[in-house]
């Protein structure tokens, strides 16, 4: 069976979700969820499969935030990218003269063919930058990078790629959430960094494909944000090496083209129409067979989160307490089992580390109780 046939079979009537960098960045948070990995490979949109049921979740970008994002991006690129150039000069040793900008969105076809042409031009421009060609751009706007996910080519549109001095290429991501006195929303900053990390990885893959050194792409990403509630842009330089490694692991772990049906364990995602109760039953059967790994941060970006949280509650899973607690308790699946181990029931070999930690914590708790300090 071809990859396209496998994808069509597993996705069934569910809506398609084309992989974008935003989708990949969100998937990075769920590399330990087999169902989310399968959905990525089968290009399936999980966000509306619970619509019409008690477990429906509101996902998607708030229209006001979208509008603010558009306005801010215009501000950064206004007057021949003056705002962006000034930021790069102030923060990243960008050359004072000889700014060469290539905007690949100008006149591009708004379809897959347009993306393909821009990807080909991005490759040529990257080659020129690395080879220090005199007409090489030092800012590429709307670069398109390519990668194969689950055996299918996908195109990814970058906000900007800035080649600063010394031939190092930096990925830049423009976001409209504010930064005030150096403080901003950590989750949003994390998501922006994940997206920039994907651009770094995809850019390196392109250079490798061209027979060029991937080292030319810096691990430092540029995140451009508005200061306070106004739209004056500022630039944060973020070290993204760990995130780039995680992105690379996700690519390696996504089911390959010829594995998609096997990974689905013979299941098919349900379509969004039809009887909601039957859809839930199909989903639950699929979750049982394929496997999920709920954590509270699923609530931020997966349309299945309320359903998975309900199932995790029913089973009393440790992951309900958050990723940090789950990391402290390797080998322990449920909170009841954690309580038993804390009370000293014999532990299996895989639980030994967690059992010792739980017993220590329990002893401290008992001491505090005995002193009446709680
Ligand atoms: S909500 Fe469920 S399906 Fe979605 S990533 Fe979390 S565990 Fe996986």
Image: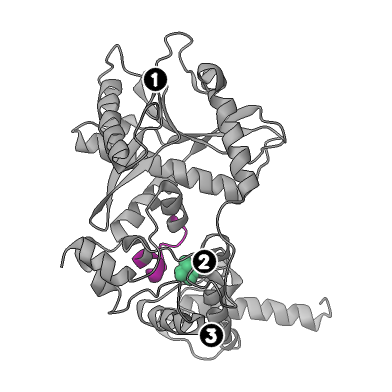
Q: Which mark is residue 303?
A: 2
Q: Please rate how many residues cluster around mark 3, counting C-alpha atoms within 10 Å: few if below 14, some from 14 to 19, many from 20.
A: some
Nearer to us in this view, 58 or 365: 58
Q: Is 236 covered by the magenta stretch?
A: no
* Tags 3 and 2 touching, CB below 8 Å: no
> For the residues carrying marks 3 and 2, which lies nearer the camera in this image?
2
Label 3 sits on residue: 315
Res 176 seen here: no
Image coords of residue 349 (percent x, y) = 40, 82
What residue occupies the far right of the structure in this picture? Answer: 372
What quarter of the picture does the N terminus occupy? bottom left
The response on whether ligand 1 sits within 8 Å of label 3 is no
> For the residues carrying marks 2 and 1, which lies nearer the camera in this image?
2
User: Which residues lie in the magenta part?
Assistant: 28-38
Image coords of residue 68 (percent x, y) = 63, 39
The CA distance from mark 3 to mark 2 is: 20 Å
Which of the two labelled residues, at mark 1 and mark 3, occupies the earlier sequence position? 1
The response on whether ligand 1 sits within 8 Å of label 1 is no
Q: Is 34 covered by the magenta stretch?
A: yes
Q: Which mark is residue 138?
A: 1
What quarter of the picture does the C terminus occupy? bottom right
Give the secondary structure at mark 2.
Answer: loop
Give the secondary structure at mark 1.
Answer: loop
Q: Which residue is drawn at 40% across and 15% down?
A: 100
Q: Residue at x 68, y 32 (%)?
A: 227
Q: Residue at x 58, y 74 (%)?
A: 320
Nearer to us in this view, 103 or 225: 103
């Amino acid at each position: 069976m071809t990859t396209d046939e496998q994808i069509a079979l597993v996705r069934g009537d569910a809506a398609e979700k084309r992989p974008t960098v935003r989708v990949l960045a969100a998937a990075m948070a769920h590399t330990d969820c087999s169902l989310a990995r399968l959905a990525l490979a089968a290009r399936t949109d999980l966000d509306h499969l619970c619509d019409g049921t008690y477990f429906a979740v509101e996902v998607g970008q708030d229209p006001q935030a979208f509008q603010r994002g558009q306005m801010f991006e215009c501000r950064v690129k206004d007057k021949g990218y003056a705002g962006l150039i000034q930021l790069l000069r102030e923060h990243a040793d960008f050359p004072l003269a000889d700014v060469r900008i290539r905007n690949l969105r100008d006149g591009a076809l708004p379809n897959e063919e347009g993306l393909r042409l821009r990807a080909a031009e991005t490759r040529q421009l990257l080659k020129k930058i690395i080879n220090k060609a005199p007409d090489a751009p030092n800012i590429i706007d709307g670069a398109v990078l390519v990668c194969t996910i689950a055996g299918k080519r996908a195109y990814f549109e970058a906000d900007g790629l800035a080649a600063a001095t010394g031939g190092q290429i930096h990925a830049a991501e423009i976001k409209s959430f504010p930064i005030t006195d150096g403080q901003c929303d950590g989750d949003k900053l994390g998501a922006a960094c994940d997206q920039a990390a994907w651009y770094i990885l995809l850019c390196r893959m392109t250079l490798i494909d061209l027979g060029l050194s991937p080292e030319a792409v810096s691990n430092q990403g540029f995140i451009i944000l508005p200061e306070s509630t106004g739209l004056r842009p500022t630039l944060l330089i973020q070290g993204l090496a760990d995130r780039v490694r995680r992105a690379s692991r996700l690519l390696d772990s996504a089911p390959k083209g010829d594995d998609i049906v096997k990974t689905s364990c013979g299941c098919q995602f349900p379509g969004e129409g039809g009887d909601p109760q039957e859809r839930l039953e199909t989903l639950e059967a699929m979750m049982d067979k394929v496997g999920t790994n709920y954590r509270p941060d699923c609530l931020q970006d997966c349309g299945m989160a309320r359903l998975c949280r309900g199932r995790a509650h029913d089973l009393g899973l440790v992951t309900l307490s958050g990723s940090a607690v789950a990391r402290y308790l390797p080998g322990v699946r449920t909170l009841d089992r954690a309580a038993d181990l804390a009370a000293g029931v014999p532990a299996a070999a895989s639980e030994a580390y967690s059992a010792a930690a739980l017993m220590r914590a329990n002893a401290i708790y008992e001491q505090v109780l005995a002193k009446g300090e709680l």
